[in-house]
């Protein structure tokens, strides 16, 4: 089996606090891979390491064969990240302006057509494409973010809780979009703490609790029906919410 | 192979992005109005061009430096980092782009002042000292942008307040607060003391020294232009290198990677670059020199009761006063009646009146010769008599757009009936001259930028589809 992402002993410490501890992952190429855990379990830190935003303290990780530490540019050239939100300074931009900016950075001199095609792909209504992002709903902003991440034609797409705060129709629309992308060959690394989302979309998943991997395997390995799945998951998570510790990253 | 984003590409996109910020165009419009108001109010006042230059080129970089810190800190504060740094871009490219954008903004700011200097140059030329201040403005822009970037790099949190506040505070101290201390020093209050060394903490003082702007006030042997320029250049280079080192080597895209002790060490290094090094190399031997009196302004004074200019056929006045109501046109010929008061007791006649004029080199006076020959019949006046002499006054080489002062000496001799000895009078007058329509032209010079920015802001606000 070919893997899009492989990690061995991936660890990240923040001034002595171990946020991610010796995580081993094998994400098959072209799959939707679930990464589930409670708040503060280490999901975001793992994604930030895999997307080269944070360097690991120890361990190794490769994305499409490129080492995240020694070849970060090669990794970045093949990935997209849909994070928490659009930068506040870009909220006055329209989706066309927002995507046009990043498309030009990707070297596309006349990005209009690509921008429209990408916005089509994520179902952003034509009426809203020329309106400032600040006026868009959370769901529409999230779709624009996905469109932005897709501009560079990434082979691996990282999504950090992409449906958080979305209503049910928006959530369903996002799921449909992710399934379409996966069918197109994009590997999707989906971080979430929504059981239904993981069960609906993913073929394999990893469960992280207090920085450590407590399960890695097929989704069905935790149970076939929702109740059995949740029971098994809670058993591995420890059944409690991990208090979010202040990160030294935010000092200065 | 993958495509890497290079500096020219990121720089071009960041420049395109600037006017897209929500309040950028509105802010630019306000900036243009403020700059125009400053030019219209300050330039035409006495010595206003110098004051304008001091404000705009000496103090203005505070704004640019603060903006530079804001842009740098904002990159990480509002989540842009994770979108930008998940693209194939190097840290040094991002920092280099930021520096270039900051410098571009600074140069745009200076360019926005050029129309005002254009109006000044059109009428009176731009004095060399103002050109030096303009050059100083460029140097201070470099300093402010690099300093703002360095401070901005230190802050990786969600708030830009720390970076903005620290940058603004330091630059205000260096550009505004310390120079008055320099004046006290040059005035002799702190001769040859440590205070003189401390003045070198101010980039404003260093640049002023480096460009020879201290020389009129400080003994030539005491100023050290080369030393000052080298210090400020070394500061800019060291701050750039430090910012690059921290951003590329000590930090990830949005956080410090080193331990706290290392951070503190780098902070101390920044303080050494900015504060300690200039103090070590600065001299403490600046001594004030005797005040040099301006050849053109220093000895001028207003006439008191001897002569007055009025418009042709204007009403004689009871007492001569400064002719502030009708300043001369500094760019052309001015027809006036010069009224010379000849004190004499009531009812006594005057004869043999002779008037001789003298002017400074920048004013010519052409009295009507016919009137000069018929001065024997002066008009009566409450305190004697008044002779009315039509003159054509032609000022030249004005120093400012308004409130130029030209000197006119009037020597008069006359004899009063019944007296054998002629009486002698002399007056030194200061004649004021303005460049007509200067205010309107200054306003017009600033209007296009303000109107364009306002139009752009309105259009963006109304943007749909």
Image: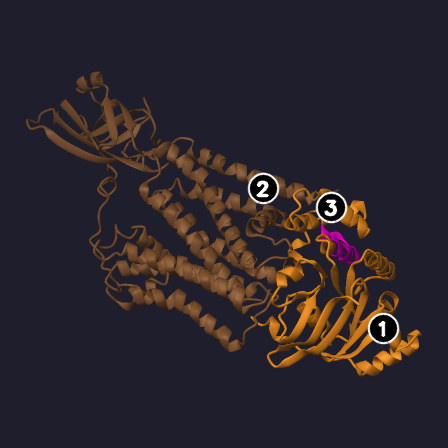
Chain colours: A orange, B brown
Q: Which residue is mark 2?
A: B453
Tag in front: 3 or 2: 3
Q: Magenta residues, as a range?
A: A132-147
Q: Position of residue B39 (x, y in %)?
A: 44, 42
**Residue A139: in magenta span:** yes
What is the chain letter for disc 3? A
Give the residue at x 26% y 51%: B215
B384 sits left or right of B162 in the view: left
In this view, B422 is above or below B64: above
Give the residue at x 81% y 65%: A32
What is the chain letter for disc 1? A
Most foreground residue, B307 or B168 = B168
Q: Which residue is mark 1?
A: A218
Residue B445 appears in view: yes
Residue placed furthest toward the front: A1
| CA distance separating discs 1 and 2 | 58 Å
Q: Which residue is mark 3?
A: A114
Q: Secondary structure at mark 2?
A: helix
Give the residue at x 83% y 70%: A204
Most foreground residue, B217 or A201 = A201
Q: Position of residue A158 (x, y in %)?
A: 74, 63
A208 sits left or right of B188 in the view: right
Most foreground residue, A217 or B41 = A217
Q: Position of residue A231 (x, y in %)?
A: 88, 80
């Amino acid at each position: 089996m070919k893997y899009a992402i492989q990690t061995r002993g991936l660890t990240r410490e923040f001034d002595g606090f171990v946020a991610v501890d010796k995580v081993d992952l094998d994400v098959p190429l072209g799959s939707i891979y679930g990464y589930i855990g409670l708040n503060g379990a280490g999901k975001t830190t793992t994604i930030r390491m895999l997307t080269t935003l944070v360097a690991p303290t120890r361990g190794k990780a490769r994305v499409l064969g490129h080492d995240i530490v020694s070849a970060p540019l090669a990794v970045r050239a093949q990935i997209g990240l849909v994070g928490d939100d659009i930068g506040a300074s870009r909220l006055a931009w329209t989706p066309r302006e927002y995507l046009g900016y990043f498309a030009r950075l990707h070297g596309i001199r006349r990005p209009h057509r690509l921008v429209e095609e990408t916005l089509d792909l994520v179902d952003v209504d034509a009426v809203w494409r020329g309106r400032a992002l600040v006026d868009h709903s959370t769901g529409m902003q999230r779709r624009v973010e996905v469109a932005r991440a897709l501009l560079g034609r990434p082979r691996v797409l990282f999504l950090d809780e992409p449906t958080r705060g979305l209503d049910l129709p928006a959530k369903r629309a996002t799921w449909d979009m992710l399934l379409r992308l996966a069918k197109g060959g994009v590997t999707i690394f989906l971080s979430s703490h929504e059981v239904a989302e993981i069960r609906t979309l993913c073929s394999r998943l990893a469960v992280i609790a207090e920085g450590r991997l407590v399960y890695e395997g097929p989704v069905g390995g935790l149970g076939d029906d929702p109740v059995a799945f949740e029971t098994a998951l809670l058993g591995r998570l420890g059944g409690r919410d991990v208090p979010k510790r202040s990160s030294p990253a935010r000092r200065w | 192979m993958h495509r890497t984003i290079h500096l020219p590409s990121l720089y071009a996109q960041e420049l395109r992005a600037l006017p897209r910020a929500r309040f950028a165009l509105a802010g630019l419009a306000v900036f243009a109005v403020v700059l125009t108001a400053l030019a219209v109010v300050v330039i035409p006042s006495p010595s206003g061009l110098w004051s304008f230059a001091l404000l705009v080129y000496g103090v203005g970089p505070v704004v640019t430096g603060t903006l530079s810190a804001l842009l740098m800190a904002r990159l990480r504060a509002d989540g842009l980092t994770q979108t930008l740094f998940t693209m194939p871009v190097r840290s040094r490219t991002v920092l280099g782009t930021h520096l270039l954008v900051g410098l571009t903004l600074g140069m745009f700011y200076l360019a926005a002042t050029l129309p005002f200097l254009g109006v000044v140059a059109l009428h009176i030329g731009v004095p060399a000292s103002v050109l030096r201040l303009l050059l100083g403005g460029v140097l201070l822009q470099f300093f402010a942008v690099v300093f703002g970037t360095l401070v901005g790099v230190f802050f990786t949190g969600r708030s830009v307040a720390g970076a903005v506040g620290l940058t603004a505070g330091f630059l205000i101290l260096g550009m505004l607060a310390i120079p008055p201390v320099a004046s006290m020093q040059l005035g002799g209050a702190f001769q040859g003391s440590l205070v003189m060394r401390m003045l070198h903490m101010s980039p404003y003082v260093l640049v002023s020294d480096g460009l020879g702007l201290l020389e009129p006030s400080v003994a030539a042997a005491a100023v050290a232009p080369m030393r000052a320029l080298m210090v400020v250049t070394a500061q800019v280079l060291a701050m750039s290198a430090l910012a690059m080192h921290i951003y590329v080597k000590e930090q990830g895209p949005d956080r410090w990677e080193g331990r706290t002790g290392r951070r503190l060490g780098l902070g101390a290094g920044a303080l050494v670059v900015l504060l300690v090094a200039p103090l070590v190399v600065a001299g403490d031997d600046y001594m004030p020199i005797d005040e040099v009196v301006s050849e053109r302004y220093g000895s001028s004074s207003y006439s008191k009761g001897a002569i007055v200019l009025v418009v042709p056929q204007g009403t004689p006045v009871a007492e001569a006063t400064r002719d502030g109501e009708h300043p001369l046109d500094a760019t052309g010929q001015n027809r006036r009646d010069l009224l010379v008061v000849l004190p004499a007791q009531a009812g006594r006649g005057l004869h043999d009146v002779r008037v001789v004029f003298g002017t400074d080199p920048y004013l010519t006076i052409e009295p009507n010769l016919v009137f000069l020959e018929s001065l024997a019949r002066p008009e009566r006046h409450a305190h004697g008599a008044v002779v009315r002499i039509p003159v054509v006054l032609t000022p030249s080489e004005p120093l400012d757009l308004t409130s130029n002062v030209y000197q006119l000496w009037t020597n008069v001799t006359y004899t009063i009936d019944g007296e054998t000895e002629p009486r002698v009078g002399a007056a030194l007058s200061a004649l004021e001259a303005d460049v007509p329509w200067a205010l309107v032209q200054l306003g017009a010079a600033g209007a296009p930028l303000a109107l364009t920015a306002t139009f752009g802001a309105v259009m963006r606000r109304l943007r749909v589809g």
